[in-house]
Amino acid sequence: MTLPRSRKKRPSAPATGNTIFRIFSTASGPLFTLKMSDSDVTGAELAIKTYGYIPTKSITIIFVILFSASTFLHVIQSLKARMWFLIPTAGLCGALETLGWSARLWASISPENNFAISISCIVLAPTPFVAANFVILSRIIERLGPVYSRLKPKQYAILFCSAPHPHPGEARTLLFFNMAEHDLSKTIIPYLDRHLSFPLLAHLVETSLFPVEEVQAAQYELAKGTNMFDYAVNLFEQIHPDEKVPTEFDEKRKNAVSTHERLQQEAQAVLDVIENPDVAQALRQDKNQNLQYLKENYNLTLDQITALYNFGQFQYSYGNYSGAADYLYHFRVLSTDNDLNTSAHWGKLASDILTGRWDIALEELNTLRDAIDSRSPSSILVPSASGATSAPEPALVQLHSRTWLAHWSLFVYFNHPQGRTLLLETFLSPTYLNTIQTSCPWILRYLAAAAILSRKSSSLPASASAPVSPRVRNAIREVVKVIQTEEYQYQDPVTSFLKELYIEFDFEAAQRELTLAEKVVGDDFFLGEFREEFLDNARYLISEAYCRIHQKIDIGDLSERLNLSRDEGEKWIVNLIRETRMGADAKIDLEKNVIEINRPPLPIYQTVIEKTRGLALRTQAVGAAATRTGQQNGTVAKPEAQAQTVAVK
């Protein structure tokens, strides 16, 4: 396959291996980690796998042996009896079954990367076997008497081979489409904090994409690493109803209570000082000046102020997110420790997300994004001291930070009223678009969904909606380019819908992909609430593209392409033309049941203007780049020329 650009080598995600990226850390090591360890997320105990279960190793070995022996015997039999038709039929069937069950045997060890091999081989294997049955049937008819058959013996094999096979899209829909395969929870969770992972796992319980017992096991493994002991005990009792609760929880609870009392006393001593009205009036914007004032007048040092951070961190660990947000905010106002301030910033963002304060969370998100983009070392996630042997490249660390922020921002963008528009503004910027293409191409699902959700509103007349930026207005066009470029490393029904509609111009394939995308969107944690809105906007895109290339459109035909009945389609199209700009060009003839599109031709000078828009700016950019390259070459060439002159002398 020829790619439109060279493939980028994606850096290993910080959520894998031994590299630990932290939000909160103490001197003794990380307490909360953005990394989900292999045993937490991808281990056999959790089984959040593509299969939805873990194949049993002994069963798969038995089937591999049986199919291998059967294939070997059929091949020997065909050679001995000179029945050559058995080799490409029964022999091929056995080989495919052996390969498919071998993939399942592999899945019992490493289930992540072999689902396609297993399901493809096992589903396709019966086809050549059925062909062998037709050949055998024709030979039986020859023996018993062709007069008793309505078809000639050879016509059975010809009929089977020439029979119409399912369309690839239909085969994909009927055979290969597995809803669990398109669930991104397993992919996204490694880039989230433990507490941010709980809502995703709770959503998996509701959707029933995976066995409830396995999702509960995943929740239990995550809860064990926190101070939410009652929640962990409750999950343990649901998973193991006949077993006693481990005594370790009682010990941890006692230690947590004593730690809570100690940290609360330390933090309260600081709060008593900073909540004093006289102190509040004396504090200024300069943190160093504030620390000096607090030390001189109240003997309050930076180490004592850190008690606010420690107590906020502890409250976060047992699920008091609003309290954690308050203490972390007070700490950031006073502290000059850049590392702890950054850690508190991420923790404050997580707390605001989990408490549903979306306006405040959006402000935190924007502030953190600006800090990361400024390439300030204190604003970027750094590896913990216990696991880092050398400082990583700043550009790579910045890329990882943007990757984490892209995943965390999904909570905000799909809950804030203006979130979809803000997502397009952020993710379509060059820096974050490069981040998505390099390290997290699965975010394209949410970028494509946001573009679809914003399309209808961006097409409304200017008086009916707020001003829309050019980036949002042209979001579909930009997203389609990225989908076409990144197709080799990620695609799903949502991205495939845009590809079929705007690249292949295949309306039937787009209709099939929309049917699948509707289910994917409905099951997605972030997109589930927008299912109806997504479907409505996707139908608008189909009708818009269809009307663009036709002058007369049968309403019944368009309704069928929109997966609507004739009456529903007629009502939907009438409302669409009434609400959007299509009303200026489209008229409905109810007698003929057609839509007539009267689109005036674009003047030639307007066409030239559109084609050459931005040409001057691009020319200046190319000239500046050429000048810069020439200056660099000249700088390098001067020392060489001087050396040659000295040599001649």
Image: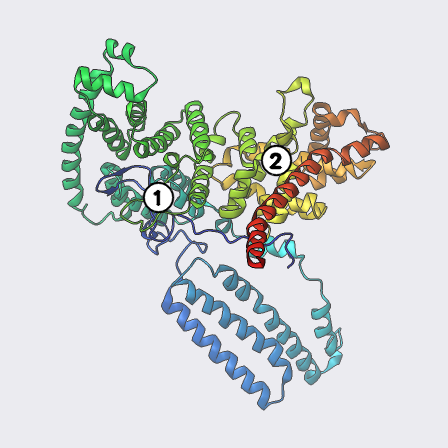
Q: Which residue is mark 2?
A: 452
Residue appearing at x 48%, y 26% in the figure: 416
Q: Is residue 594 visible?
A: no
Name which residue type carries label 1: Phe
Which mark sits nearer the N-terminus, 1 or 2? 1
Q: Amino acid at mark 2?
A: Ile
Packing grade of label 2 (10 A; few <14, some 14-19, many >=20) is many
Residue 348 place in picture, x, y as percent:
35, 29
- Say which residue label 1 marks: 21
Q: Is residue 444 above or below residue 112?
A: above
Instruction: Compute the Cα span from label 1 to label 2.
Output: 34 Å
Q: Element type at marker 2?
A: helix
For the residue pair 351 and 624, the one nearer the viewer reads as 624
Q: Is residue 520 above or below residue 75?
A: above
**In the displayed structure image, the side of residue 137 where residue 642 appears, left or right:** left
Q: Position of residue 53 (x, y in %)?
A: 40, 56
